[in-house]
Every structure is written in C-alpha cells, then in structure tokens.
Image (cartoon, rainbow, N blue to C red):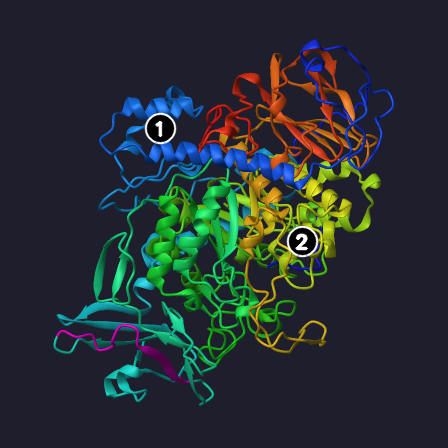
Amino acid sequence: MRPSLVQHSGLRFCPPAAANSRQYGFIPDSSASAVQPEAAGGRFGGQLSAGRQGTARKTSQVRASDRQTKLDILKKENDALRAALDSVDATASVDELENQLKAGGIDTEKLKQQGFDARSLVAGNGQDAKTSEDYWSPQVPVEENFKDDYGEIPPVPDHDGTICLKWDQSLGSHADHFRYRWNVYKGMRASIDKNEGGLAKFSEGYKIFGLNRGVRDGKEGIWYREWAPGARALALVGEFNNWDPKDNHWAVRNDFGVWELFLPDEDGTSAIPHRSRIKARLETAYGEWVERIPAWVKWATQTDGEVQFNGVYWAPPKVGKPGEEPSSDQTYTFSYKRPPRPRALRIYECHVGMSSQEPKINSYLEFKQEVLPRIRNLGYNAIQIMAIQEHAYYGSFGYHVTNFFAASSRCGTPEELKALIDEAHRLGMVVLMDIVHSHASKNTNDGISMFDGTDAQYFHSGGRGYHWMWDSRCFNYGNWETLRFLLSNTRWWMDEYKFDGYRFDGVTSMLYHHHGLKMAFTGNYDEYFGMATDVEAVVYMMLMNEMLHSLFPTAITVGEDVSGMPTLCRPVAEGGIGFNYRLQMAIADKWIEVLSEHTDDTWDIGNIVHTLTNRRYAEPCIAYAESHDQALVGDKTIAFWLMDKEMYFSMATNTPSSVVDRGVALHKMIRLLTLALGGESYLNFMGNEFGHPEWIDFPRDDSYDTSTGKLVKGNGGSLEKCRRRWDLADAEFLKYRFMNAWDRAMQHLDKAFGFVCSPHEYVSRKDEGDKLIVVERGDLVMVFNFHPVNSFSDYRIGCPNAGEYKCVLSSDEEIFGGYENASKKYDVTYTTQEGNYDNRPHSFMAYAPSRTVAVYAPAQYADAKADQNVLGVPGLGVKDRGPAFER
C-alpha cells in the first residue's frame, strides 16, 4: 500500500552515470560476421539504419505450427531421456546410469563437481533429480530436531549517531537531526533495559499477553492478560462458559492498566477447549458494555451466517512429528531450517487466497501443493506473502489488519500456514511476510481500534490518529505498550511461523507526520529531516530492525518507502534505520508514464536509464517493473498497457497481431532491463510474469470512497475475477507461455551469473536515436534495442574485458515468441578488439534486431545446446549452472 499522491524524488549519490557518446564505425570481425544470422530491418518490415551494414531481414512470422513442431521434438527427446532414466532398476550400476545421462548430452563430470550425484537417482530417495528444478533449485535436506539459532542484541554503540553520514557527507548539514534521533533511540533502549529486562524480553510480549498456558500456585491452566487502561471492568467470555462469565472469569486490573485472570485446568482438562470461540467483554470508561476480540489473539474466524469475527483459543493438544501433515488437534513441527539469506532476492509476491485457478479462496495447503512448485520452476528464491495478518474485509488486499497476531482463517489454520512455510524452506526459498505496522483497520467490532472505549489506546487521538486516504487508524509509536505490541508482533511471526523476514508496508506514511500525502519529494534534505519527520516512528523502526537482525542473523527487512529517505538502509549501529532493502517504487511509475504518454519512437532512453539507476549509494534496492496495485480493477498492468483488449482476441499462436507481437516483445525487454539496472534484488507479483489478462476484483459490496465521497459500485461478492489463470500460461497454443518462459530464463540467468547484485554496473550506451541501451552487469553485456522498426547489423558494443563472448540469452528465441534472428543457436563467437569505444577498453560487433534484447557472456560460460538436455532451461545457453551458481 502506498500514498497515491506522492511524487518521486531525484535521489543523490547514485552510481556514476555511463557515457552516452554516439560513435559509428565498422571494423570487420571475421569471427562474428562469418556466422552472422541473416540481418533484417524492423520487426514489422522496417529498414536497416543508415551507416550500418547488413542484408535485408526476414519479416515473415514463424508459423505457430512450426514452433509447435520444434517444441514437440524437444519434449520427445526429453521424454525419451526420462524414460531411459526411469527404466533403470534401483540396484543398477551408477556407471550405467551415467552413460545414459551422457547419451542425453549431459556433462556428468561437471554435475559431480557441482554437487549432483547420479546415485541420488539410483537410490530412489524421493528427490527427483531428473528434472531441471532439482538441478537448478536443489531441495534442502531434512535436519532432525533442529533449533533456531538466536543471536544476542548488542549494547548501543558509543557514538553520536552520525557514523552513517560517511556514505553521504552532504548529510552533514543535518547532522544535528541524526544526533537527536540517536539520543531518542539510546534513551528508549536504556528505558527498555531498565524496566523490561532488555529488548529481547520486551519483544516477547506474546508470551505474557493474550491467552497462554502457565502455572499459578502450582496449578496448570490458562493466563489471560489484556492491556486496556480505559476499561472499568473486563471478563473473558466464550463457548467455554456459554458466553456468560462466572466469578472467576472476571479479570483484575493492575496499576499499569493490565487486566489478568487465571483459569486452572479441571481434572487435567483445559478450561477453554482448543478451537473454541472467545471474546473479551468489558465496560468502557463511558459506561458502555462492549465485546472485543482479544488484541493478542492467535486466531480469529468468521462463523457461517455471522458478519463479525470471533477470537479463537488456538492450542492444539498434540504435537505432530516433523513434516507430518497438519491436523486439527496437533501442532505442526518444522523439518527444515531457514535457508541462508540469498545474495540477491528474486521475490515472487503472492496472495494465497486469490492464487487458485478456480473462482474461490485458495487454502494454505493448496498453495503449498499447487503454487510453490510453479514458483520453484520459474527460479525465484523468495516468496513474499500478502494478507497473512487477519483482516475482516477481504477486499482490503490484507492492508486493513484487524488481528495482528492471527493468521488469516480464510485460507486455513495456523498449522497449515506453518506447513506451507516449511515446504517453501524445503525448496530452498526464503519466506517474507507483507506486514502492516503503518496503520490498522478502524473496525471496532473485529479489530483493536477503540478496544477499551478510547481512541488513544494504541493510536494517536483525534485527527492525528486517522489516515484520511486509507480510512484507517495511525499508531502512536511513542506509546510504551504500542511499542511492546508491534515489536512483539514482528518477533512472533519469526518465532512461531519461521518467516524469514518482512516487507514493511507504508513506511513513507510512518516516516512523516504528513504521511507523504500531497507531498512532492524533490531530494532536498530539508524534506527528510525536520519538523515533518515522525522521529518516534523512526525510532520504532530502528528498535525493530536492531531486534530482528540481532536475534535472527539471516532476517530480511524491506521498507516500502517512496520518499527516498536517506539512511533507511544503513545499519542501526551506524545511526541508520536498519532495513536491508528499500522498494524502488519510482520504476513502476516510470514505465506507466512511458507506456501511457509516449509513442515508441519518442521514448526518452536517457531518462529511463536515469530512473532505473537513480538510487542511493550503499543502500540496496529491490526493483520491480509493476506493482500489485496495478493488477487491481481500475488500474493497468504493463501487459494491459501494451496490448489492452487484444489480450482477449489475439493471444492464440496462430492469430497474427502486430499489437500483441509488440506487446510481448516489450514486456520481455522491460522486465530484463528492470532486473538488470533497477537494484540489487527483484520482485514480481503473482501472474504478471506471463501477462495475466484479468484484473483482480475482490468480492465487494457497494461502498463509498472516503476521500471523495463518491459511490463505488460492488461486484455482488463475486470471486470470478479474484484468481490467477495459470491455465493460460500452461496452454501451448497461447502466447502467454512465451512471457512465462522468458521470465523463467531470466531468473535462471541470475542463478548462473549472480549479476543482479553485482557491484559492477555500467551503462556504456543510451542512444536516443537508435533507442538502444548497452548494459554491463557482472560478467554480462546486455544489448537492448527498443527501436520500433530499425535493426542494426554489426553494431559495435563496448565491453570491459578482452576475449570471446557468446550469446547466452535472447528475447528473439522461438521459445519466447521470437523470430530467431538473434539466437544462441547460431553459436556465434564474438571476438573483442582493443580500443576505446563508449569509454570501454574493448568492443565487439553484434546484430541487434528491433525490439530485442540479447545477453552476451564470456564464451567459456556459454553452451548453445544447454537447453536440449533434461536439466536445461529452455532458451538459456549457459554451460552447466554457470560460473556463480546459487539457488
């Protein structure tokens, strides 16, 4: 969620901009030109650019039937290899199996060096190592009886909070602000240490508040504690007492406004049965009797036929075996440790409820069985799950949270969510949660707003406590119990569910008293450090990040900040706010601007590159080409901007359409350019990788826009458009599969080369006339030709290293819906020549078809036939698993 009226800033201290010298020249290169594929003009019948040499390009489209035939041949070859492998008896010799692998074109010696053992196939140990998924995304072994490795929270460093300024000395003009917030942070840490026994203990409030098993006077039972300082009386009611509190069901208040009661077991049986409904009944300061769901409740459900939710006492009486399928009466026991933090995140952002192909609310277990394998196949190493915290209004996309410690019951039980996370860890994926601490639902019946009858319990009172754009409540981050509640909430999901970290929603709204609304950030540091800054919120985020990263050494935190707040992603120990990444939110808006306001021939190439690379030095960013908001009804994804209604009529492979051909071509290029230049990690929202054609329209009734007062028509509660049409990506006769295959190859390219987080990032050419961009990232050289009609023969490409290059990936491959005019299959060797070109010490010449991107790697890492064996990735020409393989 984001403030929709914010404008993006021009940030300082970006990586050095690359040269944009436009030079022409032709130097014969026999190694390239001798095998050069037939050159061409525009994709749709254009011409060769003046000053370039080459023959006329083919303009006829490859027929769908031809594509189908080649794919069928490849599938038959792979099926034959699988059959050969399957025919091997479990006791057959490893040598025999290796010979069959070699016959299939697989380099077994290299596989052994990279940890692949044919014995795993013969042994029949349940790991199907015959697939590319097992080769490129190996499963994590079971580790029995493992325990989380907790770190320790270090003392506050003895400095003035300005260490982080060494990364940007121009921040020295606001050093006093950094000293001030550091002193507030130090003071808060000292108070927590003195009064709560330290930040680690303070963040375990869920062990004290809410309902927990415990002992009093030697008797076992259930403690219930609730902070409700404005209440006159409080009792616990539910199915266990037929909603009629007995004398011992009334809580006692202490001097700090905390109510507590103890319910002893009866003959060894819990006084409150597992899964029974509960609520707190309390008298407000104004004499009104109300019922509330306990603020720290761990599950809440909506009974059929009822509008309101009820709290549920969740305490399974049995303990399941590690990895055992969850059941209604036993806890889930994890089998797999958290994976190590990846060098770069490739995040698949997902929503469990709308992940089904059918018009229904999907379950955690269905997602585990049906969607996780898809994500693994695509090559992502992280999932970011939306809408986990319970939210009474499904249509809020999970951003109007009512029950902060409760996993959404629409998708299943808490134990089923744990099983999903454990499975993701088995597949080697880290699991991030989209957590909402920027605001809360104003729903008083189901949430924590007005819990004790006052508007200032967890939130600011009056207008400051209301977010007019989101129609929600704003937390008071200077309140002691609000800090306990939120810090404990972040630790709870890590402790109990084994999440690996968080994407913090609405960080811009937290950072400033104005919430970023109607604010145009220009990059002037006065906008970040002054009276508009909510220092209490900043200090909360510092406390949260220090706690998480100290206790959980592999924890990942991502801040959704549109303002570009300096030091957001510097460690707390330096005086920074402590996030690992910020979301690079300006990129998606730039692509919307380009696609909605400009024709292809007027794209401002330099401005696009500037937006992609405009980020703060030493503060990592996560890039994404389009946001989940664009997938919602009323907005447009990139695929919609490109193809619009043609997506409904012209996506069959045998249906010619220049609109769709353009759309598919640019969809691929935009995503790789964003991946290559936009940051140190990457994010994609579920279904956008293949150009999902339908809006997301959550079931909803008629309502009113709180910011305008206008009527918003509902859809009658329909789930028809609240799903993901996976069948479209799987259909061989539809063009969606081209974009899906491209996304898979893109992710695996990073697995092989690790270019996304490489410190070497250089743009040697951003040519406005040719509409061409040359990018160096890591070992790779990428050539993007965005020109709508011009293709360039023997185009000179600057590069950093001498030697031989080969194409390892091209958007013009047939498997990606291309024409194979630029293809790895030709196995061309491009030999570099010395001499400064575009400020690079070496260069080579290559063919650059219109609306095509080609990726070149040092020749020793290329294998044009790599995708012809069962372990390869279609369209990717990387030898083995590349020089820098990481899951």
Amino acid under disc 2: Thr
Amino acid under disc 1: Phe
Q: Inspect this view and state whether residue 138 appears.
A: yes
Q: Residue at x 73, y 51 (%)?
A: 643
* Rendering coords of residue 564 (x, y %): 64, 47
Q: Nearer the viewer, residue 728 or 795?
A: 728
Disc 2 target residue: 637
Q: Residue at x 56, y 57 (%)?
A: 725
For the residues labelled 1 and 2, the Cα–Cα distance comes to 40 Å
Mark whose residue sits in front, 1 or 2: 1
On screen, 709 above or below 673? below
Q: Is residue 331 magenta?
A: no
Q: Inspect this view and state whether residue 614 appears.
A: no
Q: Nearer the viewer, residue 336 or 556?
A: 336
Compared across the picture, whether 264 is left or right of 155 comes to left
Disc 1 target residue: 116
Range drawn in magenta = 268-283
* Rendering coords of residue 345 (x, y %): 50, 41
Q: Quadrant of the C terminus?
A: top left
Q: How many marks do you count on the picture?
A: 2
Q: Badge 1 local density, few (<14 within 10 Å), some, or many (20+)?
A: some
